[in-house]
Image (cartoon, coloured by chain):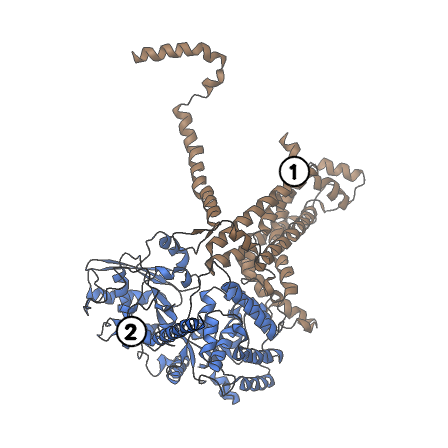
Amino acid sequence: MSIESLINRRSLLRGSVAAAAVVGVGGLSACATGGPIGGDDTPDPTTGGESQAPMDPNNPFGLEEDATIDAFIFDGGYGTDYVDYAAKQLNTLFPDVKVTVKPSTDIAGELQPRFVGGTPPDLVDNSGAKSIGFGTILDQLSDLDKLLEAPNYEGTPIKDTLFGGVTAPGTFGGRFVAMNYVFALYAVWYSQSLFDENGWTPPTTWDEAIDLGKKAKEKDKYLFLWGREAATYYQTMAIESAIKQGGDEVRLALENIEENCWSHPAIQAVFEKLHTIVSEGMFKPGGSGTQFTAAQAQWTNNQDALLYPSGSWIENEMKKQTKEGFELTGVPTPVVDSSSAMPYEALHSAAGEPFIIPTKAKNAAGGFELLRAMLSAEAAAKFAEEKFAPTVVEGVVPEDGFGSTALVSQSDMLAAAGEDKFDFKFVNLYGMNADMLTVWNSFLDGQDDVAGLTSRLQKIVDDVRNDPNVEKVPVQ
Amino acid sequence: MTAADTTTTRRAASPRGSGTPRRRRHRLTFDKVSFMVVFLGVPLAVYAVFVLSPFVQACYFALTRWSGFDPNPEFIGFENFVRLFQDQTFLKALGNNVILLVVIPPVTIFLALVLATIVTMGGPTRGQIRGIKGAGFYRVVSFFPYVVPAIAIGLMWLMIFDPSSGPVNSVLTAIGLDQFQSYPWLGRVLTAMPVTIFVIVWAFVGFYMILFVAAIKGIPSEIYEAARIDGAGRWRTLWSVTLPQVRSNVQTAWIYLGIFALDAFVYLQALNANGGPENSTLVMGQYLYRTAFTKNQFGMATATGVVMAIITLAFAALVFLVNHLTGGSEKEERR
């Protein structure tokens, strides 16, 4: 009896270790193995499986010559013209294929009836505030592994042209279903010119941050500021710091919304430091009543605060409201101390703009082919040049970052991080951000302490875990 | 043959038909049928397709577990409703709607009625009954907020109450009240709801003032003159003459404002899209929106919608009942 259970547990452990090895931290090894890893219970002759047939390098997905491709693209900060550009490239190989690129700002709203009716488009950029929650459509999405195996338009296998770890954000429950196209990384941003002027250096630990906050006070400035809709940027920063400090177990506990996950010592240590910063008055007061764009302008324009944690989109977002000569620069999130499990240089990097191909798409091969065109070196370089943002395709951004200090610092951070890149998705995957905003606004406003913050965040997570309406996506 | 048949039957029918002349009047001619199809059938069909069928569908989806993207929702009975009323956040939102419902209609109606009285009969107590000097100007100005879209009103007040650069805090700190330096009016539990209510009342008062002005203008001035001769003061006139005369307008206003207070989505979304500090300004509409579009629980969200509809109908019924029990004008009008 006891031996049997022991064996069971051991085989279970072995199984999970093997699974972890296959999926890998960055998900890189997942691409290498190819083919669906598991959970593919809806095989579709046009999209999944059948990878035995040799690929034609010019037409790896068997696109028909006179097919039509129906692409549904989120029309946000990056527009949709980059997909049009890829469509033109596609037409050089397949002149008779007709590609329709439909821009949309309401992906979920417009595609809901099409998913329900079983007539989804061939390619969807599931992005923006009104994107479809991945948990809800996971079983209606094709595995994209064969995309990585295919050669790009220049002849190199696509998997060899991408940054490390870019498949991780599109991998759910071991299945790689979303090709994220734009590279984004999370950092703490500051004005290099302001720091040079005052002889300040960006902090690498929280104690250094607190020291910097004291120096800022002397200049009548604050260390941080926040806006009410973006209070959870500080949660993102805290989680990053805790993962770097406590290692991958912190990430897994949160991703799997475990019991007492917020009580992990690394998270608690970061919360305590943040609470010190709050209670020392190093946050600009009034953030809970300030719109986040207004708050961000107080940082980029008035320079009321020194540091701001955000994603790399911040440069583009604040372009028109940034002081002349600001020299926006990013550094990795601070760690608690030098005993951290990951190096300080470790980065929270995520690729954005997830492109998906529904299993019920009429012409899934067309969706794959259009994605292949987008991932060509030519299309990727064009994107980086026009949008000032790198794609997941490596090595197409020049040294000078097209004249942007932020883009240069991104390249530096990426190079320094090496393979130490991680991502976490549980907040948006389970739609918890709105509830968490409330908690973080109170905490940053000094209305709540670490114990209160912890218990309230835990309750949000517990409610989701105990909710039978929510499909859980395990992360290994 | 057939023609003869019809004539005989018609003749045979006529003596009986004369006993019931109504039957003849109801005969369906092409004229009548086409009229009914166009003026009754088409609107009815539109109503059935775009109003009734979504209602029925919503009632069904409220009983399912549905992600919104799944073609086959799972039927789970009343589970959504049970969970809804166990959810602290929903109960908080419901409570906030009740606060709006209790505060907004009486405050708005009171202010609108007072303003309407001032511009119609607040003038000098001698001579003809008329409003204060420049009444026409005030009437126009006070209607302005209603012309501005709700979302613009929300965003405008958001800037006015901005902690760092808003004029409210600038004025308060300028007169020496330093505790309002960077005070987040919409970011503290104590002030978020009162400020929100203030903005909504500000937006609505002008419209209801115009409504009451029109009603008051319809009251014969002899009544006011008689009251004045009897020695009634301004408040007495308002309470004993104006109010009973505009009673049905007040009832309408109350129902409209009440229905608004049970929704209030636009203003709340503009002022505090994430529900305000500690969800102190979260309303059911926002809860529904959040459940559907950020949590992708469309079954649960439709259940919320059904609950909102039931509460709104119950409220309207309550207003009618109260009015009926207190001997409202509705009954007299029906006669």
Q: Colour of chain B?
A: brown
Left or right, A293 with reference to B185: left
Task: Looking at this view, name the residue that lies furthest to the right.
Answer: B231
Q: Position of residue A169 (x, y in %)?
A: 39, 71
The image quarter containing residue A225 is: bottom right
- Residue occupied by mark 2: A33
Left or right, A256 with reference to A278: left
Left or right, A229 with reference to B36: right
Q: Position of residue B103 (x, y in %)?
A: 66, 53
User: How many discs appear?
Assistant: 2
Q: Does B204 sit above or below residue A461?
A: above
Q: Which chain is blue?
A: A
Q: Residues within 10 Å of mark 2 (few under 14, many from 20)?
A: few
Name the quadrant of the N terminus of chain A: bottom left
- Residue occupied by mark 1: B218
Q: Does B243 sit above or below residue A148?
A: above
- Indicate the amino acid at tag 1: Gly
Q: Mark yes or no: residue A228 visible.
A: no
The image quarter containing residue A371 is: bottom left
Judging from the image, mark 1 belongs to the subunit labelled B
The image quarter containing residue A214 is: bottom right
Distance from disc 1 to disc 2, alpha carbons, whole Å, reads: 83 Å
